[in-house]
């Protein structure tokens, strides 16, 4: 657990986030061995193939927050010297004001007292913040970037990735689900449909299944007695 008050927001978006992060990883890995470079002034983050600098994955980047071990705190981009007071992070602050979530409205959020604050903890915290940002803005994917001295910066990216379709998700989900822990699978499926722009219909009043659909086809998620995903049936066009 990193920031307990924010974790439920990240959990809700977990399935959509996993699919979009997977798409970003695939696009970057297609470059082969590569590096990333961020230009804060230009608002870009670019992945470049090391063996051929002309091969790039260029994205528009939006700083969300930085997480630093020195002060043991998270600093939201709207309060960051390199951030935009009216940028993406301001949407998170507005949600926090509406729902009275102090961790979203305070400019700087201290680590929990019992947090190790080490490299692994900060990396996990960055993924939590990325998930929260996706959930509250609808933008994805995000990128967690090590920026020196143990600090990580979290960016939302406008990347040249195709929209997430039901057909694409059905292919990726068996692999994604094997490595993704969902605290509430029903809610994660509902939120996946919401964020992806699909339609969702519950199969019955006990919510034992959910059918999602878009122009590429339909997929029906079945849930077991513990509300876990028990199976996925698809019909693709």
Image (cartoon, rainbow, N blue to C red):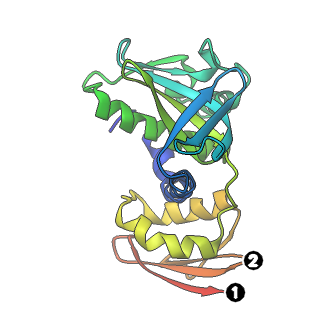
Residue 114, how many percent across, how many down?
Answer: 24, 25
Q: Is residue 77 above or below residue 31?
A: above
Callout 1 secondary element: loop
Q: Is residue 216 above or below residue 42?
A: below
> Could you tell me if the residues under marks 2 and 1 are in contact, i.e. CB atoms within 8 Å?
yes
Callout 2 secondary element: loop
| Residue that mark 1 sits on | 237
Q: Quadrant of the C terminus?
A: bottom right
18 horizontally vs 216: left or right: left
Closer to us: 134 or 147? 147
Disc 2 crowd, CA 10 A, few/some/many (<14, 14-19, 20+): few
114 horizontally vs 198: left or right: left
Q: Quadrant of residue 184?
A: bottom left
Any mark on residue 215, and which?
A: 2
Disc 1 crowd, CA 10 A, few/some/many (<14, 14-19, 20+): few
Closer to us: 125 or 151? 151
The tag earlier along the polypeptide, 2 or 1, is: 2
Q: Is residue 236 above or below residue 171?
A: below
Closer to us: 126 or 32? 32
Q: Residue at x 64, y 29 (%)?
A: 89
Residue 142, how many percent across, how many down?
Answer: 56, 42
Q: Residue at x 54, y 57 (%)?
A: 30
Q: Is residue 79 above or below residue 7?
A: above
């Amino acid at each position: 657990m990193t920031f307990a008050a924010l974790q439920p927001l990240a959990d809700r978006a977990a399935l959509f986030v996993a699919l979009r992060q997977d798409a970003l990883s695939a696009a970057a890995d297609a470059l082969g061995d590569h590096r990333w470079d961020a230009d804060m002034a230009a608002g870009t983050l670019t992945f470049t193939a090391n063996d051929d600098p002309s091969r790039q994955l260029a994205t528009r980047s939006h700083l969300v927050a930085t997480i630093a071990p020195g002060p043991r705190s998270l600093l939201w981009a709207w309060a960051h010297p390199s951030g935009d007071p009216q940028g993406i992070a301001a949407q998170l602050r507005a949600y926090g004001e509406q729902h009275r979530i102090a961790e979203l409205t305070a400019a700087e959020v201290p680590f929990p007292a019992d947090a190790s604050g080490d490299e692994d903890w900060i990396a996990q915290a960055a993924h939590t913040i990325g998930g929260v940002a996706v959930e509250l803005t609808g933008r994805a994917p995000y990128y967690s970037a090590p920026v020196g001295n143990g600090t990580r910066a979290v960016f939302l990216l406008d990347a040249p990735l195709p929209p997430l379709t039901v057909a694409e998700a059905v292919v990726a989900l068996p692999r994604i689900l094997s490595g993704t822990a969902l605290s509430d699978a029903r809610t994660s499926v509902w939120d996946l449909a919401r964020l992806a722009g699909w339609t969702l219909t519950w199969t019955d009043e006990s919510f034992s299944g959910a059918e999602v659909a878009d122009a590429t086809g339909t997929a029906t998620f079945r849930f077991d007695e513990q509300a876990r995903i028990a199976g996925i049936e698809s019909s693709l066009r």
